Each structure stands twice: as structure tokens, then as C-alpha cells.
Image (cartoon, helix red, strand yellow):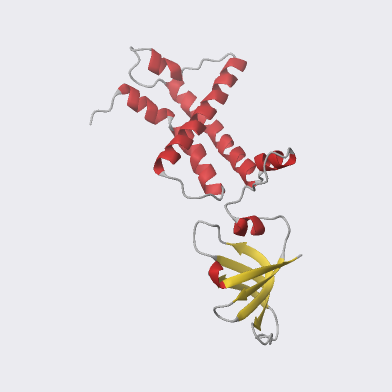
Amino acid sequence: MEITKFSFGLLIIFIPGLLAFYIVDALTYHKEAKFHDKLLRAYLFGVLSYSIYYLLTLLFKADFEILKYFTNDTVIYFTLGQLKDVFSTSIISIAVGLTLSWTKNRKILFRIAQGMGITKKFADLDVWSYIFNSPDNYWIRVRDYNKNIIYQGWVEAFSDSTGKDELLLTQVSRFDLHSGKPFDDNPLERLYIPISRDDMTVELIN
């Protein structure tokens, strides 16, 4: 398959969008997106990054040379100035990715919308994520109905909603579900619990 000048140019200028997308994808919790959705987001992140760089070139009265590659038929290869534009925009895209990740993880948009009474939706994938992403550090009681055990402790880590259900608790006490008899003389320092949400309930103690 022949790679045309236009398609090669698109591959090069797509780099900043891919960088921003990778950062957002790695630093935020989200459902697995379809391939065409990933391409669309990478494209939009790239457009945003190039738009910011273009505004900076206007502000500092610099040349936006990447356009010459597509508008001038005599330009076949990328010049150093055009590669500089791609590199500079890639640096901006890193800042874009980090900013978007911070905004999403801090739920800035949803907080503004909730404050204005626009929506009651929350930014997390489900209630599981909503509870454990809360800034409140909960002491929890987990009732495992499959193993007939009660776990009590602080939440140190939890699985996101894209994989299996997992909890990591600290200062953990274990009790028999029916009798309430403790299994341990002293609390466990840490305990990893792989457990299905269908087999448990979680009680939050502030």
C-alpha cells in the first residue's frame, strides 16, 4: 500500500494527540473504549494541542510552519521547522493530558454542574468507585456471605470497575459471620481480599 504525502503527514502530526490520549488513559479510571472512540479522542486531543500551539505562535509572532507541508505542493519532506512544531506541540500535549487527567480525577466538571443544579450524576463509573474514591477515609465492615467471614479495617486500595473485585485493607480484624467470634487475637497489618460484589455487603463507618 502506497503511503501518500498527506497520509504520512497525518501520521506525524497525530503524535501529540496520541501522547495526550495515553496519559489520560493511564491516569484515569474509565470503561474500556472502542477502537474508533480511542482514535476520535486522540484526534481531538491533537487538535486541542495544535490549537494551543497555534495561539502561542500568534502571541509570540512565530511561524506555524506545519501548515506549509499541506498547503505547499513543492514541500515533500518535513523541514526542521515543521518537526519543531510537532515536537513543541507534543510537549504541550503532555500538559494537556495531565490537565485533563487532573480535571477528570478531581471531578471538576461534575462539581461545577452539581453546584449549578444541572445534574445529580457523579463522575465515577459506578457506586463502588464512588464510595472508595471519596476523600473520606472510611473504616469499613465487609460481610463475605460465601466464606461466612466479617472483615473490618481501613481501605488502603481497591480495584477499579474494569476488572475483578479486589480490596486491600489495613489493621484488619476478622470475625465469624454468624457467631461474631474473632478469628485473630490481634488485628492483621494488611489483608488482600479478592471477593465478588455479589457475595458481600460493605458497611461504611466514618
* Left or right of residue 134, residue 197 in this image: left
Give the image location of residue 32, x and y in percent: 47, 49
Please determine whether, in this image, residue 49 is positioned above or below residue 188. above
Please determine whether, in this image, residue 159 is positioned above or below residue 24. below
Give the image location of residue 202, x and y in percent: 65, 68
Kindly indicate the quadrant of the structure image that contains residue 167: bottom right
Q: Residue shown at 44%/40% (left/top)?
A: 37
Q: Is residue 45 visible from the viewing direction of this image?
A: yes
Q: Residue shown at 55%/15% (left/top)?
A: 62
Please determine whether, in this image, residue 52 is positioned above or below residue 137. above
Q: Is residue 195 visible from the viewing direction of this image?
A: no
The answer to which of 116 and 35 lies nearer the viewer is 116
Please determine whether, in this image, residue 13 is positioned above or below residue 157. above
* Left or right of residue 195, residue 190 in this image: right
Q: Residue furthest left?
A: 1
Kindly indicate the quadrant of the structure image that contains residue 157: bottom right
Q: Residue furthest right?
A: 206
The answer to which of 66 and 103 lies nearer the viewer is 103
* Quadrant, the C terminus: bottom right
Give the image location of residue 86, x and y in percent: 47, 27
Give the image location of residue 170, x and y in percent: 67, 71
* Left or right of residue 25, residue 8 in this image: left
Q: Residue shown at 69%/85% (left/top)?
A: 180
Q: Residue shown at 64%/46% (left/top)?
A: 121
Kindly indicate the quadrant of the structure image that contains residue 60: top right
